Image (tube, rainbow, N blue to C red):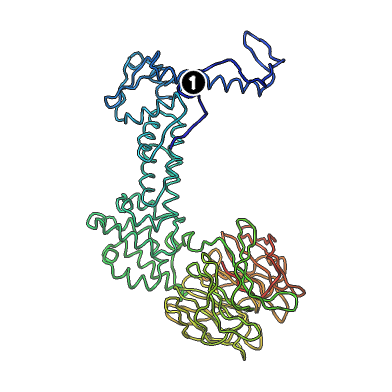
Amino acid sequence: MAVNIPEVMEENETPTFIHQDPTWQPNKKARIQDGVISSSETDDTLLMRHRHALGMLAVMQTMHQRRELCDVTLMVQDHPIPAHRLVLAACSPYFNAMFTSELKECNEKTVTLRDMDHVAIQEIVNFAYSAKVNVTEENVQSVLKAACVLQIEQVISLCCEFLKTQMHPSNCLGIKSFAERHGCFELQQAADTFAQQNFCQVVQQDEFLHLSVEDLVDLIRRDALNVPKEEDVYESVMRYLNQNREERCKRVGEIFEHVRLPLLSWEFLHSRVKEDNVVTKDEKCKGFFDEARRYHASQFYPGLHWEVSIRTLPRHSFSRSIYIYVVGGEMNPGRATTGAAERYTPALNCWTSIAPMNSPRRGVGTVMLDKILYAVGGADNTALDAVECFDPPVGAWRYLAPLQEPRSSVAVAASGGNVYAFGGYNGMTSSRTVERYDPNTNEWKYTPDMTSPRSMAAAVAHGTNIYVIGGYDGSSDLSSVECFSPMVKKWRAVSPMHTARSMVAATSFKERIYVAGGCHCSVSLASVEVYNRATDAWILVQPMNHPRSGVGLAAINQRLYALGGYDGSEYLSSVEVYEKEKDEWTVVSNMEAPRRRFGCCS
């Protein structure tokens, strides 16, 4: 790749300093001051200086090519490279210091450069005369190394930019190490970020297996590590250890300090980790394993003590999404049921329509699992058992196995790789039954019933449990909350909300469960409650700007969004965002159309 700075004259072109542009007019305001021609017209002055500089550079390039007036020879790997001291000193602080100091090289005709590649030095000398450097995959490292020693920032920058374009999971760790050795901190940061963002591909490469323990730890400790689940980090570490098990297992405790064992699934923890003697034989690792067990147990027994550590904090990628999806619901006028779907991009504050569902539905339950959007149940004229899913890369909906029974106004959540459907209205009454969907078998199966029948409730996966909140039991709105442990398949009651509410929305946000809006005794609510599982208590925070029943709630990019709903007099299209630090709601956008009782997830 040839990279140019400014254009210069070709090798055989004769330079001239006579202005030959026929359209050019002399500067009438030019004047002589202190023996120097100056001008009050800055553009003319800059143009003249630019052309003068290019002309001088072209003359020096021609003289170098003809070996005229060369006064120094660089000897690199027994290859002589003639040059002019003045040109080298003007281009390189390294040569400037060499030729203007008391060093012996100051007056020597031949200067030997050790530990450098002669082809790279020739490229850099050519750059000094031409402002061009030929950077390729084959020479970029040697040119960059030489440019770093000679302190030529333009060449360093060009080489670093070239390496950024060549970044790949197979070489990013090597580029990072090379950049660190040569003080190219911006390139080092770029390679580091690339490795984090592409972790699952990077760990399959040979470079990963040859990291030092220190570099491995530096990589896996990051909150920003882009992994869908902590199991991927565990497996990559085991692959690394098995490359040189005898030596590396001596430092297994140091490594596993940065593997977040509490965030592994209970099944993986006991079927995989517990059976691995690398973990069970190391005292420090035993402590990490016990920490993980206490963390999981605390999900079912809130009174059980566990300490917050870096290992209990989810990595950023675990909950990262770039879209909020809105599907189905009731539209004005006439409470028409729709299958229309759209998605919101908070970063751009814009809405985009996506393919509509195959079946129009209101009271539909939605959830994202492994980047697939599931739409469960709902109603058109009658309660539905139909289930469909949307694959964003494909951009189309397809039907899945139906529910065991119809469920309108159903609460849906995902945990442990499964989708759960809680209660809902089955066409006759509010239901207490629960179904679990396995994507691997495309089957719905019943799982233990809730304590209370509920429709128009909200369900939230939080930690390793699922919380089903509020709703309507067939006669009244509910404030009660039930907690289900998929691990032991048992239900328990937790503290009720301050206000009974149905057509309510809830989501997990910043280690808490947020519940917004809904209705109580047919009155739409603006109030917002927050549940802390550690204290088993609810608190009220700033209410939304508008009452909203049948509202959507989603958390994305450290912000909480409330969408649409019904305020008691009209259907809403507005979107509000909550900032926890300010305890403040702000209207930021509008959906493409007002709606309520729709599916919403991120």
Of residue 1 and residue 32, the one placed in the foreground of this image is 1
Can you tell which quarter of the image residue 386 is in?
bottom right
When the figure is inspected, residue 206 is found, relative to residue 479, above or below; the finding is: above
Q: Where residue 20 sits: x, y (%)?
A: 61, 18
The answer to whether 407 appears left or right of 79 in the picture is right
Of residue 434 and residue 514, the one placed in the foreground of this image is 434
Can you tell which quarter of the image residue 227 is in?
bottom left
Three-letter amino acid code of the residue under disc 1: Glu
Residue lying at the far bottom in this picture: please name it. 428
The answer to whether 214 appears left or right of 358 in the picture is left
Q: Where residue 545 sits: x, y (%)?
A: 72, 65
Q: Where residue 74 sits: x, y (%)?
A: 33, 21
Q: Residue sitting at 63 percent across and 20 percent down?
A: 21
Q: Residues within 10 Å of mark 1 (few under 14, many from 20)?
A: few
Of residue 491 and residue 246, the one placed in the foreground of this image is 246
Quadrant location, the N terminus: top left
Of residue 9 and residue 328, the one placed in the foreground of this image is 9
User: Circle 1 sits in a helix, a strand or a loop, which is it?
Assistant: loop
When the figure is inspected, residue 458 is found, relative to residue 61, above or below; the finding is: below
Residue lying at the far right in this picture: please name it. 569
Residue under label 1: 13
When the figure is inspected, residue 566 is found, relative to residue 13, above or below; the finding is: below
The answer to whether 253 appears left or right of 536 in the picture is left
Can you tell which quarter of the image residue 364 is in?
bottom right
The answer to whether 177 appears left or right of 556 in the picture is left
Q: Where residue 161 sits: x, y (%)?
A: 46, 40
Quadrant location, the C terminus: bottom right
